[in-house]
Image (spheres, rainbow, N blue to C red):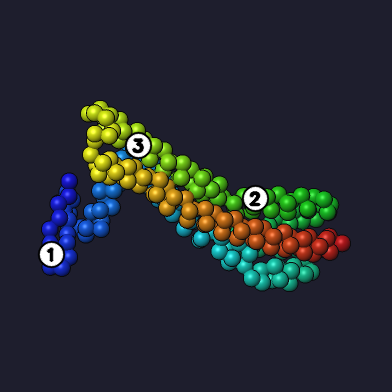
Amino acid sequence: MPWCFSAGRRRRCVIIGRVITCAECHLFLIIQAAGWPIWPLIACSVLALALVIERFVSLRANKIVPAKLLDDVLTVSRSAVPTPEVVTQLEQNSVLGAVLASGFRALNSNPRCSEADLRASIEAAGRLAAHQLERYLTALATIASAAPLLGLLGTVIGMIEIFGSQSGGGSVSSSNPAQLAQGISIALYNTAFGLIVAIPALIMWRYFRARADAHLLTLELSAERFMRHLNQLRK
């Protein structure tokens, strides 16, 4: 158990030999009192934070659809298909670059390929790009849906333990009301923490979902324009 002492105008607590602030001590006591059901929620919060950071980095516009990339590609390939080395560099540039490189690679492997084959190659690259944009969004949505249920489960388990311990020593009416109220409030910490985890996760899922859809629309429009350019190169 932590113990507190005064240090000037501020209070400090000691837990396992480490001096912390009373706010940290209070948080530690809440986690300890809430019991084991709160630990899955803590794991969900850490995982959700990691997914949000990863999606922020991965869904940046310069990594998906860099500005002027399509115009530069159309200018460079105005008269001929780029060499395989240039196509490889284009593929590594961004997600849009990988989609465009798939069309060039199809023409390099078979200059007389049909329009249907070209379109199939670009559509396959587009499906792979869509998978990359939507990666981890399902996990984030699952956390947003499951966190309130985990919090509710922790509260129910806490309430069962509270009323079970009260009935063990006598009737609930003869028990200490203040102690009973404190136990119920501690059990409700699980529900509150579940909502704290779920609400930001839901907001970020909606945000990343809209961002991914916007990038997919840009990729689709760019692919259509690029397809018309490839048909001109084939003639």
Q: Residue at x 28, y 33 (%)?
A: 172
Rendering coords of residue 110 (x, y %): 78, 52
Q: CA distance from mark 1 to mark 2?
A: 59 Å
Rendering coords of residue 145 (x, y %): 51, 45
| Quarter in which the C terminus is drawn | bottom right
* Side (left or right) of 37 relative to 78: left
What amino acid type is highlighted by mark number 1? Ala
Write down the residue under mark 1.
7
* Side (left or right) of 178 relative to 81: left
Q: Which of the two discs, 3 and 1, sits closer to the camera?
A: 3
Write down the residue under mark 3.
159
Q: Does any portion of residue 109 appear in the rendered image?
A: no
Q: Are the residues tagged 1 and 2 within 8 Å (C-beta)?
A: no
> Is the residue marked by circle 3 packed among few (<14), some (14-19), or many (20+) residues within 10 Å?
some
Label 3: which secondary element = helix
Residue lying at the far front of the rendered structure: 173
What amino acid type is highlighted by mark number 3? Met
Name the foreground residue: 53 vs 82: 53
- Find residue 233 and report its image quarter: bottom right
* Side (left or right) of 208 relative to 33: right
The disc, 3 or 2, on the residue closer to the chain's N-terminal end is 2
Q: Residue at x 74, y 62 (%)?
A: 221
Rendering coords of residue 121 (x, y %): 74, 51
Q: Are the residues tagged 3 and 1 within 8 Å (C-beta)?
A: no
